Image (tube, helix red, strand yellow):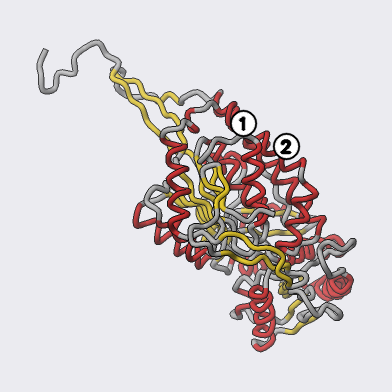
């Protein structure tokens, strides 16, 4: 396991000599440590990225040349998939099958943006029709510059890929700070990029605490754009800091996503998608459909089945065969989730199942899959992100009531609807105020489709061509093409 910073193509310790421990969330044991970057380390990384962009020619390479590096990184990830997945499990806690899925998706992300980099070569400048035929004008797209990226701990390598791949494909250089709770695979990504021959300074990975290393990236004057995924509170702080230098930002923040289930839905399928929407990755998913609205006609039957199935989920160390719910990522997250459950009960909610540490798992940050009912609409459990395996379920009578309840949130990241009536499902999908909408499912995510939210769930979009365009500037080039003198001040 790597422990040093990756700056300008070399592995270096932090200048302070400080380190951060890696704690396995399944056992609470310290298993490793890595360098804790401070502002001088970040300064070196940013200056390396600046040089790679301004002088060394990374943005001047053809898209095909950049694509070759991205494909080599994708192949490097695939060749080490088993090892990387195991690192994700001992670092994050998620079950091994989920980690393997994530690593495969990360490799696919680099392949996808390699294709867009090649396509960019074949995209001609856009000619603009002007009312004055003495001029011609065109629009070209160019790389933004140096990107500072700060990623969360819930999908460590995948979230790195979502930012690194499109930024490098577009011709940007980057300083990446992984979450302090889960930095192991980001360091391995740096090693894979190095083995792929990526030029020095194009990708720099600095590990460290958010208020120190992350803040140093945000405030650095040589960073052109900030890309962040995480909490709304931190995102607001980044946006405020970026305003001082008029930096561009893209923010993928929190959610409290609704899932509306009508009484013509198949109960078994509905329960499966409810569980996938909230128990995958221990519910530590920004788009988790944590507010479930069930039409009155099937509410009681669905609740009985949901509680039955939730109690059957095997909980344990993510490396153990058959485990589908691992520990939360850290002691801090465990304390926050258990406190949120207790607060929900105090506010009047009923715990239909779960809510406690699983029997026999005395060590590790484990919380049972939890189903809450009778949750007051003004309570934190209904309105705020818990970020754990906790779902709130309530009945509704009419379509209008369901859509109003679904949209009554400061968030707008995702939403889902389930119904056998296609017209109704499309109607409700259209009524949702959310950037990602699922019909008859919850959570499937594809690199080709845009990802991002309305309202306080963020600014901008990741993935697809939208993620690529995130890292491009638009330039107008206008030419005076007439052979006649302009003749405003100097008459011919």
Neighbour tally class for label 1: few under 14, some 14-19, many 20 plus, Cα within 10 Å: many
Residue position marked by numbered label 1 in the rendering:
67
Task: Kindly tell me whether residue 353 is visible in this rendering.
Answer: no
Residue 144 is drawn in which quadrant? top left
Residue position marked by numbered label 2 in the rendering:
75
Of residue 245 and residue 189, the one placed in the foreground of this image is 189
Locate residue 352 relative to residue 472 in the image: left or right: right
Locate residue 460 relative to residue 335 in the image: left or right: left
Above or below 165: residue 24: below
The image shows residue 365 at horizontal and vertical percentages of 74, 74
The image shows residue 372 at horizontal and vertical percentages of 74, 78
Which image quadrant: the C terminus? top left
Above or below 150: residue 202: above
Residue at the image point whose x is 55% and y is 25% from the top = 121
Task: Kindly tell me whether residue 413 is visible in this rendering.
Answer: yes
Of residue 321 and residue 390, the one placed in the foreground of this image is 321
Residue 432 is drawn in which quadrant? bottom right
Locate residue 303 relative to residue 125 in the image: left or right: right
Task: Identify the disc placed on residue 135.
Answer: none
Which image quadrant: the N terminus? bottom right
Residue at the image point whose x is 46% and y is 32% from the top = 56
Residue 413 is drawn in which quadrant? bottom right
């Amino acid at each position: 396991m790597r422990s040093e910073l990756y700056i300008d193509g070399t592995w270096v310790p932090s200048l302070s000599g400080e380190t951060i421990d890696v704690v396995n969330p399944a056992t609470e044991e310290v298993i490793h440590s890595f360098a804790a970057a401070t502002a001088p380390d970040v300064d070196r990384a940013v200056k390396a990225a600046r040089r790679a962009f301004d002088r060394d020619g990374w943005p001047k390479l053809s898209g095909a040349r950049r694509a070759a590096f991205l494909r080599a990184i994708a192949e490097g990830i695939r060749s080490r998939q088993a090892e990387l997945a195991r690192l994700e499990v001992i670092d994050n806690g998620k079950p091994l099958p989920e980690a393997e899925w994530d690593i495969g998706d990360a490799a696919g992300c680099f392949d996808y943006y390699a294709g867009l980099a090649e396509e960019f070569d074949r995209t001609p400048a856009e000619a603009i029709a002007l009312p004055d035929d003495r001029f011609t004008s065109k629009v070209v797209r160019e790389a933004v510059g140096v990107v500072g990226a700060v990623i969360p701990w819930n999908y460590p390598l995948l979230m790195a890929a979502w930012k690194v791949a499109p930024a490098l494909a577009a011709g940007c250089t980057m300083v990446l700070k992984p979450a302090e709770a889960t930095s192991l695979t980001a360091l391995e990504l740096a090693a894979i990029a190095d083995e792929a021959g990526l030029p020095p300074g194009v990708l720099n990975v600095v590990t460290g605490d958010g208020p120190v290393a992350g803040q140093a990236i945000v405030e650095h004057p040589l960073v052109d754009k900030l890309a962040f995924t995480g909490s709304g509170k931190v995102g607001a702080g980044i946006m405020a800091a970026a305003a001082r230098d008029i930096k561009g930002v893209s923010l993928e923040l929190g959610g409290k996503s609704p899932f509306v289930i009508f009484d013509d839905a198949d109960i078994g399928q509905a329960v499966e998608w409810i569980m996938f929407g909230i128990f995958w990755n221990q519910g530590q998913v920004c788009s988790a459909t944590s507010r479930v609205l069930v039409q009155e006609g099937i509410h009681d039957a669905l609740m009985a089945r949901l509680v039955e199935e939730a109690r059957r989920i095997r909980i344990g160390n993510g490396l153990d065969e058959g485990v589908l719910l691992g520990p939360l990522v850290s002691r801090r997250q465990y304390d926050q989730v258990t406190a949120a459950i207790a607060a929900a009960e105090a506010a009047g909610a009923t715990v239909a199942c779960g809510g406690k540490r699983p029997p026999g798992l005395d060590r590790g940050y484990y919380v049972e899959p939890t189903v809450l009912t009778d949750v007051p609409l003004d309570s934190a459990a209904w309105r705020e992100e818990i970020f754990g395996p906790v779902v709130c379920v309530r009945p509704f009578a009419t379509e209008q009531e369901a859509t109003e309840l679904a949209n009554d949130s400061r968030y707008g990241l995702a939403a889902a609807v389930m119904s056998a009536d296609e017209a109704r499902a499309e109607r409700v999908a259209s009524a949702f105020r959310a950037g990602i909408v699922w019909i008859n499912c919850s959570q499937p995510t594809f690199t080709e489709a845009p990802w991002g939210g309305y309202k306080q769930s963020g600014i901008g979009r990741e993935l697809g061509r939208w993620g690529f365009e995130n890292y491009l500037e638009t330039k107008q080039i206008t030419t005076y093409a007439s052979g006649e003198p302009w003749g405003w001040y100097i008459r011919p």
